[in-house]
Amino acid sequence: MSEDAFRKGAFFGRRKGKRLRPHQAGLVEDLLPRLRIDRTGPVDPRSLFSRPVAEVRLEIGFGGGEHLLAEAAAHRDVGHIGCEPFVNGMAKLLGAVHEAALDNVRLHDEDAVGLIARLPDASVDRADMLYPDPWPKRRHHKRRLASDETLAAIARILKPGGEFRFASDIDHYVGWTLARLLRSPDLVWTAEGAQDWRRPWSGWPGTRYEAKAVREGRTPSYLTAVRR
């Protein structure tokens, strides 16, 4: 499916927050172009990395990058692709990637849907969508990233048995996403009991958004679906 076939407007809000520090600005100018995935044409995910990788994982909207960094550091044999249009989040991640000398991270600093449309069928082992913008107003629901169209596009790029993982602290958005997973012809929700969506995944490092949710009394949910 092409990007235009399922794109219905931006799935994110602002592109930039406070002014970047000089060091951060330098990383965006110098390091990001070396890690950035080409913005045109088909993308072979395994060819993005300087050495062979055992798997390829995609994180859609990595925010402050806490989860992506922890995963990349813990699984150096895995290639990690991170998508994030927010400049300040990208700058923070770049600093940590540089400090840890991670060579298994590649980045896309625009809408994830554009990249997903250019990935081959069955080319990704896991896709994570963690604490996406809930767009709580009804008139904005069309901007929610966990739409039928986007989930179908994610299912296309997942290998058979590959995982799609979703986390949110907004109950209505969790229900919205689950409804779309349950009616998907390509994805199967794996939960067998309540603890399967109340308990985070093994090795879960948490994110800043999750910590804020817990402080404010909201309970996160964790959904896992596999590609048929």
Image (cartoon, rainbow, N blue to C red):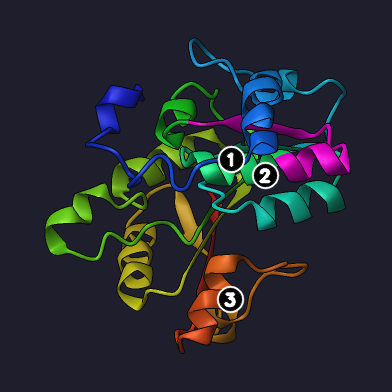
Q: Are marks 2 and 1 in contact (CB under 8 Å)?
A: yes
Q: Find disc 1 in the rendering and name its residue.
A: 90
| In the image, farthest residue toward the left | 139
> Is residue 191 visible to us here?
no
Percent x, y of residue 47: 73, 18
Is 185 rendered above or below residue 28? below
Asked whether 23 falls inside the magenta stretch, the response is: no
Percent x, y of residue 136: 24, 66
Residue 141 placement, left or right of 223: left
Q: Find disc 3 in the rendering and name its residue.
A: 211
SS under mark 1: helix
> Is residue 213 visible to us here?
yes
Q: Label 2, label 3: how many angstroms apart (C-alpha)? A: 18 Å
**Residue drawn 48% across the image and 84% down it:** 219
Q: Nearer the viewer, residue 75 or 208?
A: 208
Please report the bounds of the magenta region as a residue range: 95-109
SS under mark 2: helix
**Residue drawn 20% across the image and 49% down it:** 142
Q: Amino acid at mark 3?
A: Ala
Is 65 rendered above or below residue 156? below
Q: Nearer the viewer, residue 140 or 166?
A: 140
Q: Find disc 2 in the rendering and name its residue.
A: 93
